[in-house]
Image (cartoon, rainbow, N blue to C red):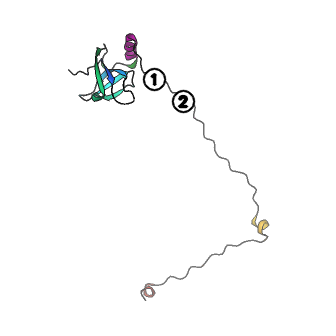
Amino acid sequence: MSIFSVGRMCVKLAGRDAGRKCVVVEKIDGQFVVVDGHVRRRKVNVKHLEPLNQILNLKEKATSAEVKAAFEKMGLAVWETKQKKTAPRPSKQKKGKKETERIPEKAISGKTETKETKKKAPQKTKEEKND
C-alpha cells in the first residue's frame, strides 16, 4: 500500500497550483495520481506532492461534488470551475459586388485599342543547336 492512497490529503509543491491543498482521488500507477480539491482536477506526478497526515473518507474516482462536500466539511477552500458563456457565433454574410459604373474604353481614350501579340521566333533544330 502506497502513501498516496485514495483520500490522502496533500500539498502541491510544483506548478501553478503550488502550495494548495488537494486530495488523491485516483491512483493511476506508482508515479501518477489524480488530485482534486483546491486545485484543478488533474493527473499529477507524486514527486510534486507532499502528503499530509489527514485522510478523507472518499471512494475511488470520487466526483468533484463529493470532494467539494468533504472539503467544505473540513472548512477548506475548493477550486471553483466557472461555466464559460459562449456567445452566439455571427453568421457569415456574403460580400456583395460593388456596383461601379463601367465606362467603355472608346470613351476614355477616344479610339479603340487593339492588343498586338508578338510572334515567337522559330525554334532551332537539333542540328543548328549543335553548331
Residue 130, image quadrant: bottom left
Label 2 crowd bin: few (<14), some (14–19), many (20+), radius 10 Å: few
Real-space Cα separation, disc 1 to disc 2, in angstroms: 15 Å
Graded by Cα atoms within 10 Å as few (under 14), some (14 to 19) or many (20 or more), the crowding at tag 1 reads few
Name the amino acid type tagged 2. Answer: Thr
- Residue 98, position as x, y percentages in the image: 70, 51
Quarter occupied by the C terminus:
bottom left
- Observer-nearest residue: 36 or 124? 36
User: Relative to 34, does residue 100 appear above or below in the rendering?
Assistant: below
- Determine the residue located farthest toward the top in the rendered image: 73
Q: Residue at x 76, y 61 (%)?
A: 103
Residue closest to the eye, 110 or 26: 26
- Residue 81 is marked as 1
**Secondary structure mainly formed by the magenta segment:** loop
Q: Which residue is mark 2?
A: 86
Please tell me which residue is depicted at 77% across the width and 66% down the height of the picture: 108
Between label 1 and label 2, give the one nearer the viewer: 1
Looking at the image, how many numbered discs can be counted on the residues?
2
Of 98 and 85, nearer the camera is: 85
Magenta region? 65-89
Q: Say the numbered circle drawn on residue 7.
A: none
- Sequence-first tag of 1 and 2: 1
Q: Does 111 appear above or below 42?
A: below
- Find residue 105 and report its image quarter: bottom right
Q: Is residue 3 left or right of residue 36?
A: left
Residue type for callout 1 = Thr
- Measuring from the top left, give residue 74's x and y in whole percent: 37, 11
Q: Residue furthest left?
A: 1
- Which of 88/2 is in front? 2
